[in-house]
Image: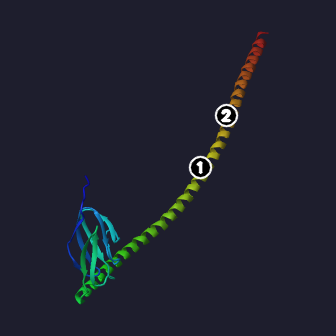
Amino acid sequence: MINLILLTLVLLNNTTYPGETVEIYVQGEGTLKLSDNCTYFCNFNKNCINATSGNYTICVSYSCKEGNYTIIADNTSYNFTVLKPTYDYLLNSTIKLEIERNKLKKENENLMTKLNEYINLTAMLEKEKSNLEKTINELKDRISYLENRVSELELDKNSLESSLNSLQKLYYYSKLALIFILAFVVGAYVAIIRR
């Protein structure tokens, strides 16, 4: 058994002006194609999409001429009309475009300000990085100097320990010699006194 899902389309507005939109509601799944390159599906920036159930917006560019345009849903055609712009419409469109231009200009200024802040921050970070690298190199040199100094002190300590050992031996032998001499003198004195 084959399930056939038909694609149906409802035009929520069937007239528009250049620069405006046409809203459609789609029920089912299938291919939607627009008949002219000056119209496109707004969220897709294409004039042919695979659609599922839901709402879609068709953008009508300013280059579209007045006349009828076709939406082909599978093999069924739906028409909408692009009207000739009136003076009031052109005036309102110009005002809207001016407002949009000013909004984009302000957004551009804000983005340029942010960009300059990031450029300044990058320059500051580069300078800070350079300073940190210089400090790191100085610390490495200081560590190397201190390690050499520790090695020298270690050698001095070993030399002092060796000298201390020699002095302790000398002190021990001097003490023994002093005791021996003292014993000899006392023995000689005792011998002299006994005679």
Displayed quadrant of residue 110: bottom left
Residue at screen point 26% across, 54% down: 2
- Which is nearer the eye, 109 or 56? 56
In this picture, is 151 found above or below 116?
above
Q: Residue furthest bottom?
A: 87
Q: Position of residue 104 (x, y in %)?
A: 34, 77
Which label is found at residue 161?
A: 2
Q: Position of residue 85 (x, y in %)?
A: 26, 86
Q: Earlier in the sequence, mark 1 or mark 2?
A: 1
- Which is nearer the eye, 160 or 106? 106
Q: Residue furthest front?
A: 1
Q: Is residue 147 visible?
A: yes
Displayed quadrant of residue 49: bottom left
Q: Residue furthest top?
A: 194
Image quadrant for the C terminus?
top right
Q: Which residue is mark 1?
A: 143
Please, what is the three-letter code of the amino acid marked with disc 1? Ile
